Amino acid sequence: MQMKKTASRKTIPIRSLPFLLGLALAVPSARAVDRDFTACLDRLRLQAVQRGISKATFDTYAARIEPDLSVLESLDTQPEFKTPIWDYLAGLVDEERVQDGRAMLEQWRDVLQRVEERFGVDPATVVAVWGVESNFGRSLGQRPLLVSLGTLSCMGRRQDYFRGEFLATLKIIDEGHIAPERLNGSWAGAFGQTQFMPSTFLRLAVDFDGDGRRDLVDSVPDSLASTANFLRSGGWRSGEGWGFEVKLPPGFDISVAGRRNKHSMSMWIEHGVKRANGEPLPPDGPDRALLLPAGEKGPAFLVGKNFDVIYGYNAAESYALAIAHLSDRLRGGEGFRTPWPTNDPGISRVERRELQRLLIERGHDIGAADGMIGTKTRQAIAKEQQALGYEPNGRAGQRILEALRSMAKN
Ligand code: CA
């Protein structure tokens, strides 16, 4: 869902320190902050009641929340490290997630079949979204939703937007769908196995296990059906794939690329575009756009309407490509034919944990080897890169992993 992909929230990125220092100088006293926050909560209580939320719900779960200032920092912090698409995909679509996803397809086969019958979205696509959004329900986010959204409703940018999400959260509690203590999520309020925002929940969540509650935290059937309902409402076309990898002829004019520039298949055929394996394109079929996520030297894709629908889940082409590719892998498909234009490919989560263990063995204090590449891991990598005479960019890639492996052997 929107607004949740940012740098690790566990540590304070170096870049935000000047921001925090500025905050400390400019901000009024803690007592004034408390007073303003309490006044803001009083106004929210009024709005909640106007929306038909019971006073008891507000008074029990929202009236006494304390602001969490760290969410404001997440709101204003740009990720300090821009992830290359090959790193992004190497972590999201690795062998581990493909195996887990295939096991989930098997385990939830009957539910997924009924989901497809009702919503028209195929099992592999639904499971791919599930795997990327919450690692199949294993990573739901830890922050109490009412605290994060209450804070963002009263402080910082976009208070109007977050107020709507805060009130939607109360509505979810009021209607009895999910217990308040289970409503934890990202700093911006995306929660549950589908990582829906609360307002998205109210619009599109589905009770599919028939217990009368729409539960995207503890019910897998509700979560799978809600994902499919989201995609269907975005205009999903049943039986039409997202697209496929292609090969461009030498000298191809890439100015026609771009997700919004859809053209007929005959136009692409005329310009010499082929399937990635060299076979001709299917002459029929819907209009498609040319996607070049890493420019003309990287893999190329023709994508259609369903790619846009996936994009609607979290507006980033890299995200949509991760879901699309994972769905192909879950159906038994291979990796991309054309390699990414880098001599230092990305690494899987298993390799990230290995890299972190090697850094720990070499005395770097980076916390646990959890596969999450945060600021501390990047700083440790940069030190090792410097010592090796590499560019010290802090990137977790194949080259530094191999260098540390061979040093560990010697
Ligand atoms: Ca249910």
Image (cartoon, rainbow, N blue to C red):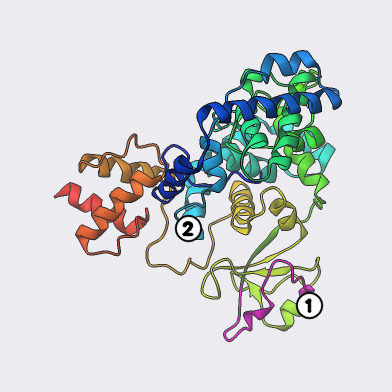
* Residue 189 in view in this figure: no
The residue indicated by pointer 2 is 82
Query: Can you say whether 346 is above or below 211 in the image?
Result: below
Left or right of residue 377, residue 387 in this image: left
Is 268 displayed left or right of 155 in the figure? right
Disc 2 crowd, CA 10 A, few/some/many (<14, 14-19, 20+): few
Identify the image quadrant of the N terminus: top right
Amino acid at dot 1? Ser
Checking the image for residue 266, the label placed there is 1
| Residue interval drawn in magenta | 247-266
Q: Which quadrant of the figure shows ligand 1?
A: top right
The image quarter containing residue 279 is bottom right
Rendered view: 138 above or below 350 = above
Q: Nearer the viewer, residue 174 or 76?
A: 76
Q: For label 1, count other residues whose C-alpha is less than 10 Å away and answer few (under 14), some (14-19) or many (20+).
A: some
Figure check: 291 above or below 104: below
Residue 68 shows in this picture: yes
| Pointer 2 with pointer 1, Cβ within 8 A | no
> Is ligand 1 closer than 8 angstroms to the Cβ of mark 1?
no
Specify whether residue 274 is painted magenta.
Answer: no
SS under mark 1:
helix
Identify the residue at the far bottom of this view: 251
